[in-house]
Amino acid sequence: MIKVQRLCALALGATCAQLSHAQTSVTLYGLIDTGITWSSNQHGSSNVEMTSGKLSGTRWGMRVTEDLGGGWRTLGVLENGFNSASGAALQNGRMFGRQAYIGLSGDGYGTLLIGRQYTPLALYGGFLTAALRWGTSLMVHPLDLDLLGGTTRFNNAIDYESPNYGGITYKLQYAFSNQAEGPAGAGFANNREWGGAIRYVGHGLTLSVGYTQIDRPDAVSNTNGAVVGDYQSALPLWVKQVDTTLSGTASSAAVLTAGTQKTGMIATLYTLDRWSIGAVVSRTLFDDNTVTRASATRLNGSGSLALNVAEINLTYQATPANYTGMMVTYSGARFQSGATHTSPHWWQVGIANDYFLSKRTDVYIAAAYEIGSARDAIAQITLNAPSSTCTEAGVSVGLRHRF
């Protein structure tokens, strides 16, 4: 009888061990980033404000993994973004606006993800910019129009990342419009996104190249498409200034609508001992643009907007816990409608220091100064309100904690 009981106990223990091994692992994680930001000119006045997520977007999330055996895994992420200064939800009020996806990963086969995700440009190129590494949003490229700052996510996205081939990986993405073919201006291509990037990592060098195209982003005729609500469609103040210049009267323009956005980038970072030097070049072209309520008739029809950005950044790690960085960025734009065009451009310099008090907690300070040149170059540091002139300065001090 005792032997039978022991056998049953052993069998039950083995069964429980198998069930435990097959259980899904759920990890709760998050990050809180809160600070104070001073701006020299916002709509004509200086400002001091409490800000959230200047270095890293404040968030909490759940990460799910399950080992399926044979080198295969199920994985998923639900990630919420919020303002740590007020508690308000970000990403247009979505519950899981930063990321929401599920997928499969297999050893030697790569990873397939479906759901709301970042573009490959942000994941492979954005994390080589000064802004995402240590420079805060003060140093994100103008209005994040080149997508490298990661402020725009894509719904309905299917994403494949390859295995690592000797330091080389690639990532492909297609985000569905979720719309059937229809009349002009609608249909399968109405508010969709596609693109990809390739990256090499080895011998202290990281090199990335990528391209993304968005057709009719944030289209009001398709609110179930790839880009809804969090696309950078707010009219840059310098475009309103272009309208004022061309019409001779104060502009009442409201929104810049793009028919197609095409963005390409090349980014690199080389690390040697305590020093890292990086360079990022991007080109973004908006075609078939329309400015709503434009005073100048030449902006009411189709037009094009090209934005070229070049960044150089330098980082010094004084100790394992202390990083100091500097960056210089040149941004040149060309807005053209028919025979009319204007070409404002901007220079931006920035410096920052990030000091880790522990593995999970750090303090940072960052400063940036932007100056515009040409007739219509109104300054606007990304995620700040625009200046009333061609210059704007900003300083952020913050505390960040991961859990």
Image: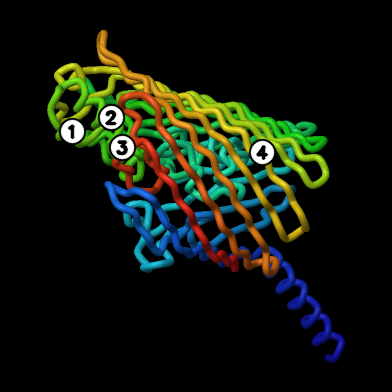
Image position of 273 with respect to 7: above or below: above
**Residue at label 1?**
253
The residue where tag 4 is placed is 110
Foreground residue among 171 and 337: 337
Check residue 239 in the rendering and tell me which mark sits there, or answer none: 2
Total numbered labels? 4
| Earlier-in-chain disc, 3 versus 2 | 3
Callout 3 secondary element: loop
- CB-based contact (under 8 Å), mark 3 and mark 4: no
Residue closer to the observer: 202 or 100: 202
Q: Tell me the crowding category of disc 2: few under 14, some 14 to 19, or many 20 or more residues within 10 angstroms, Cα based.
A: many
Q: Single out the mark in the foreground, 4 or 2.
A: 2
Q: Earlier in the sequence, mark 2 or mark 1?
A: 2
Spatial distance from mark 3 to mark 1, Cα to Cα? 13 Å
Q: What is the three-letter code of the residue carrying label 4? A: Gly
* Coordinates of residue 80 in the picture (x, y in percent): 44, 59
Viewer-closest of 203 and 96: 203
Confirm whether residue 345 shows in the render. Answer: yes
Closer to the chain start, of discs 3 and 1, is 3
For mark 3, what is the residue? 233
- Name the quadrant of the C terminus: bottom right
**CA neighbours of label 3 inside 10 A, class few (<14), some (14 to 19), many (20+):** some
| The furthest residue to the right | 3
The answer for how far apart the CA atoms under marks 1 and 4 are is 47 Å
Q: Is residue 251 left or right of residue 80?
A: left
Query: First in sequence: mark 3 or mark 4?
Result: 4
Residue 366 in picture, x, y percent from top left = 55, 53
Label 4 sits on a secondary structure element that is strand
Image location (x, y in percent) of residue 44: 28, 47
Left or right placement of residue 259 versus residue 28 in this view: left
Q: Amino acid at mark 3?
A: Ser
Disc 1 vs disc 4: which is toward the camera?
1
